[in-house]
Image (cartoon, rainbow, N blue to C red):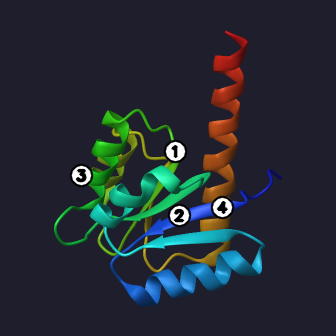
Amino acid sequence: MNALPKKICVVDDDEFVRDSVRALLESYGISVEEYPSARDFLSHAHADQSECMLLDLHMPEMDGFELLGEMRKLGSTLPVIIVTGRGDSILRNRAIQMGASALLNKPVEDDVLLHSIRDAVADMHAANRTSAAS
């Protein structure tokens, strides 16, 4: 199985969710950078060296789709896993079309989240190897 990343950022306006995800990921040796809003992430993103992002879809001011769109406009290829309490196939398709690695419904089971993170990071590394070989 693919290795887990060393660092992940979590963008979610719910402090309980951020704390829960941090506890889980840190138990696997993953460093977690937390952002309570999309705007907070954008204002600090220059310092972030994460290998993957967990992004809440429904947040005030700027939602997850808007942040993902901004990131892609800025040229970011960071793997993004969108998490939401109200997901459906339409939102999942939109997320994938926008370049998200996955859309998961809250509450996310630990093993599903870890597997999605591994897959997203592995896909990023494979894409980087392919582009470096070109």
Q: Is residue 111 above or below residue 92?
A: below
Earlier residue among tags 3 and 1: 3
Q: Are marks 2 and 3 in contact (CB under 8 Å)?
A: no
What is the C-alpha distance between the residues marked 1 and 4? Answer: 12 Å
**Residue under pointer 2:** 9
Query: Which residue occupies 70% across, 78% down?
Result: 26
| Type of amino acid at the residue the image marks with label 2 | Cys
Query: Which residue occupies 16% across, 67% down?
Result: 61
Earlier residue among tags 2 and 1: 2
Q: Secondary structure at mark 3?
A: helix
| Type of amino acid at the residue the image marks with label 1 | Leu
**Residue under pointer 1:** 78
Q: Residues within 10 Å of mark 1 (few under 14, many from 20)?
A: many
Q: Residue furthest right?
A: 1
What is the C-alpha distance between the residues marked 3 and 1? Answer: 15 Å
**Residue under pointer 4:** 7
Query: Which residue occupies 49% across, 73% down?
Result: 34
